[in-house]
Structure formats: structure tokens, C-alpha cells
Amino acid sequence: MNYAGVELGGTKCVAVLARGAETILVRHTMATTSPNETLGKLEQTLGDWKQEFGFEALGIASFGPIDVNPASATWGHILQTPKPGWAQADVANRLREAIGVPVAFDTDVNGAALAELRWGAGRGFADFAYVTVGTGVGVGLIVHGRPTRGFAHSELGHVRVSRLPGDDWPGSCPYHGDCVEGLASGSALEARFGERLERLGPDDPAWEPVVWTLAQLCHVIVCAAAPHRIVIGGGVIDRQPHLLGAIQSTLVDSLNGYLQLPDDDGDYIRAPELGSDAGPLGAIALAMTATR
């Protein structure tokens, strides 16, 4: 059975047609420009695939914040995003009407979490967290097999955590200053270190506040939901994989024996098994949940 997926990112958009992680039939990447241009190109691509191959449903894993409440009048819309032109863009309804198949719509990081849960490092678990540290910081938190829901999707990348003693850099988040995203995202690191960022070695003390901040985020996640595993991916971690072990040890120190992590081999925090395919396959995992 074929499924279509769209990973709608802030800079690029990846459309895939697949039967699962092992069978990706077609992949198409395009720049994320204006809503009308980007969605128009997606309509054309998905329409061609439907005619040539056929598919049962479409999953959309989008940058946010987005409206994921199916009872809301603005379900399927992107909300107040700093990306020019995209605030209030109706993504899901436009593609559903154009393509004529059931659509599932969620955040890009929730999609990636569902993909890792189905095919990757989260296999066998019902409670799992996927953290992405790239341009921003996002968390896909899966509880009892489903992404958390309330009046909105979770935004754990914007929690404020305790600061590394002696670190008084104000942070770069335009909304919250020194939240996790404002301290540890790729854009925050570029703002803090500029060109020096590319010259930081694995042992540079400049990584200490990054490790501390991400470990504190994991402390929050562990205390709030106790997932069986936390996976951390994204561009910053891909380029600096040494951070994972440091985050794990700092998390253990931070918990201070109050909670015991379930992995005795020190591998509670690990890299995603699906690598860069977690995002596109997240859209496929969402498509598999779509109902008519």
C-alpha cells in the first residue's frame, strides 16, 4: 500500500512516496518559498504521483507552530511563525482538497518521533521522546503511543531551564530570550559564536553551556513523562556527535539518583537510527494514521 508524505520545513520541503521505511518509491525536494508557490508545486507533484502510482493517504509533518486540533476552524493552518508570508497559511486543507485523499497533519518533530517509534530507535516503546537540535529546538513527545495533546502541541524547546552557573549570555529567542532554543539551537550558537562556531573542537569549553542546557531539557522530559528513551538528532548533533555522551552524563548528574534511567549501558540518550530520513518518514508514519 502506497502512502505520500510531505516534510514541510522552514527552508526546504521534501515530498516522498513510500510503502514504509524500507521502500521509498520517489522523493522530491524543493525550496520552501511563498505558501502559494510551495503548495502549488506540491499539488502538482502529489497529483502526478497519485495518477501514476496511486496512494491511500497523505501525511504532512510541518514546521510550526501549527493548529493540530481537528475541531478547530483553523485546523491544518500554520500559526504565528516568523517565516514571512506563512502565518495563517492553510496547508492541510488546501492539499486535501487538491489531492482528494485523507490527510494527517502534525509537527515535523512529532512526525520524526513517530517514524523512530515505528522503524527506528523507539521500536518496542509506547513512551518515547525525539529531540531535534537544528535551526531551532523541537521535541516530539510520545505518550502511550501518541503525540501529546492539549489545547496545542507541546513546545518543549521553549521551556526555560536552570542556567549553567556563570553563564549569563542572554539568549537569542525573540520570544523568550534564554529558553532552550534561545541557548542551544544552531541559530543561537551562530549568534553567540559567529564564525568561531565552525572552529570549535570537541573539547572546547564553549560546548559546556550547550550540553548543560540540553541535559536540563532532558531532565524536564524525564520528570514530566519518563520516556523509555530519548533520541537527539538535528544538524547541531549531526555535526557534533560527541555531545550525546556528555548530555547523558550531565543528565545523570542532574537527576542525582532521584530517578534511575532504564538503560544500564549508558545509552538512554542516543542518535536517531533513521538519520536524516526521520523527517520524511515521519510524514509517511503520519499518513498511515490518516482516516477518512
Image: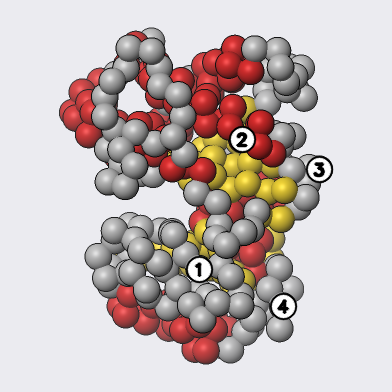
CB contact under 8 Å: marks 2 and 1: no
Q: Quadrant of residue 80?
A: bottom left
Circle 3 packing at 10 Å, graded few (<14), some (14-19), many (20+), is few
Q: Which residue is mark 2?
A: 221
Q: Is residue 58 above or below residue 151?
A: below
Single out the mark in the foreground, 4 or 2: 2
* Amino acid at pointer 2: Ile
Q: Give me the disc on residue 67.
A: 1
* Amino acid at pointer 3: Gly
Q: Which residue is mark 3?
A: 124
Out of 210 and 8, give the one closest to the viewer.
Answer: 210
Whole-angstrom CA distance, mark 2 to mark 3, is 19 Å
Single out the mark in the foreground, 3 or 1: 1
Circle 1 packing at 10 Å, graded few (<14), some (14-19), many (20+), is many
* Amino acid at pointer 1: Asp
Circle 2 packing at 10 Å, graded few (<14), some (14-19), many (20+), is some
Q: Kindly give the residue lying farthest to the left in the view shown.
A: 195
Q: Which residue is mark 4?
A: 291
Q: Give me the disc on residue 281.
A: none
Whole-angstrom CA distance, mark 3 to mark 1, is 29 Å
Relative horizontal placement of residue 64, taking residue 125 as reference (left or right) = left
Whole-angstrom CA distance, mark 4 to mark 2, is 30 Å
Quadrant including the C terminus: bottom right
Q: Is residue 68 above or below residue 161?
A: below
Whole-angstrom CA distance, mark 4 to mark 1, is 18 Å
Circle 4 packing at 10 Å, graded few (<14), some (14-19), many (20+), is few
- Secondary structure under tag 3 reads loop
Out of 221 and 104, give the one closest to the viewer.
Answer: 221
Q: Residue 232 appears at what percent x and percent y?
A: 55, 35
